[in-house]
Image (spheres, rainbow, N blue to C red):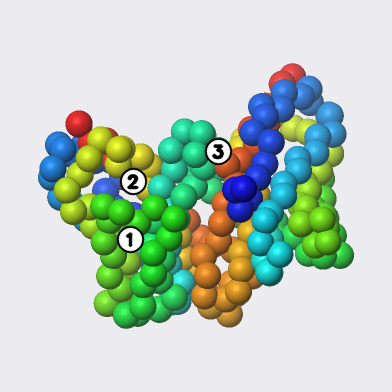
């Protein structure tokens, strides 16, 4: 199994550009989440989804959009990139029934906005 | 008050040492508890779940005190390969996302 796949692994954007970070899982997990990780800040929740068609905001949602049209995919859209969005982005997933068993993470996308 | 708080460290210990990490959480309704390990520039990986009765996995022992809203991780006989950042993670009811602490950095030296 591929698990949770994130693309791209690295990306450099210019301020004002838009892009989509892709996240796909092949484990039929209901729950999917996006986190960003910055030095000294830990992992902060951006958006999450408990199933197809259902999304909710996390701690730092401004500047990001998500949608969940299928169980497998949970893309994160940067609407107009800003240097403050330079970060490492992690996508994670879990089964609803195995929520108590934690998340499986993708390997991350390292984004630099110049 | 942050939802999940950890001492950031770093903890610098020699091989063979015993080291303990502590974590507190603010939401008394929290229902699931974990320790994750994160190596430099890698994704977090689940180390172990934490149960009210306490649980052990080899050299690792996790404890949960719901009354004090306190979680701990004890590592015995530290190995060089234990060097990493350890994240305390707390979850609420089903349908809510996991909340991560900022992590505690451990460096084990020979």
The residue beneath circle 3 is B39
Mark 3 residue element? loop
Q: Is any part of residue B32 visible from this angle?
A: no
Label 1 crowding class (10 Å Cα cut-off): few <14, some 14-19, many 20+?
A: many
Q: Tell me which label, 1 or 2, sits earlier in the chain.
A: 1
The residue beneath circle 1 is A23
Label 2 crowding class (10 Å Cα cut-off): few <14, some 14-19, many 20+?
A: many
Badge number at residue A109 = 2
How far apart marks 1 and 2 lie (CA) works out to 10 Å
How far apart marks 2 and 3 lie (CA) works out to 16 Å
Find the residue positioned furthest to the top. Answer: B110
From the top left corner, tell me how far across and down residue A13 is, in percent. 18, 39
From the top left corner, tell me how far across and down residue B42 is, in percent. 48, 41
- In the depicted view, which residue is nearer to us: A61 or A21? A61
Q: Residue at 58%, 80% (x, y): give it.
A: A97
User: In the rendered structure, the residue with mark 2 lies on which chain?
Assistant: A
How far apart marks 3 and 1 lie (CA) works out to 21 Å
Mark 2 residue element? strand
Vertical placement of A10 versus A96: above or below? above
From the top left corner, tell me how far across and down residue A19 is, in percent. 18, 51
Mark 1 residue element? strand
Q: Residue at 72%, 23% (x, y): give it.
A: B12
Asked if marks 3 and 1 fall on the same chain, the answer is no
């Amino acid at each position: 199994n591929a698990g949770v796949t994130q693309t791209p692994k690295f990306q450099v954007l210019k301020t004002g550009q838009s892009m989509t970070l892709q996240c796909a899982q092949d484990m039929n997990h209901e729950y999917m989440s996006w986190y960003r990780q910055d030095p000294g800040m830990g992992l902060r929740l951006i958006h999450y989804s408990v199933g197809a068609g259902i999304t909710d905001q996390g701690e730092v949602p401004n500047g990001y959009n998500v949608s969940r049209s299928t169980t497998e995919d949970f893309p994160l859209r940067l609407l107009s990139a800003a240097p403050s969005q330079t970060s490492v982005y992690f996508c994670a997933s879990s089964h609803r029934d195995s929520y108590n068993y934690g998340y499986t993470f993708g390997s991350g996308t390292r984004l630099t906005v110049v | 008050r942050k939802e999940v708080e950890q001492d950031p460290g770093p903890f610098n210990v020699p091989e063979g040492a015993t080291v303990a990490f502590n974590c507190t959480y603010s939401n008394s309704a929290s229902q699931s508890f974990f320790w994750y390990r994160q190596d430099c520039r890698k994704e977090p990986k689940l180390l172990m779940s934490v149960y009210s009765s306490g649980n052990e996995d080899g050299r690792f022992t996790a404890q949960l005190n719901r009354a004090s809203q306190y979680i701990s991780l004890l590592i015995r006989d530290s190995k060089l390969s234990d060097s990493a950042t350890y994240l305390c993670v707390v979850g609420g009811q089903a349908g809510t996302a996991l909340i991560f602490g900022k992590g505690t950095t451990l460096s084990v030296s020979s």
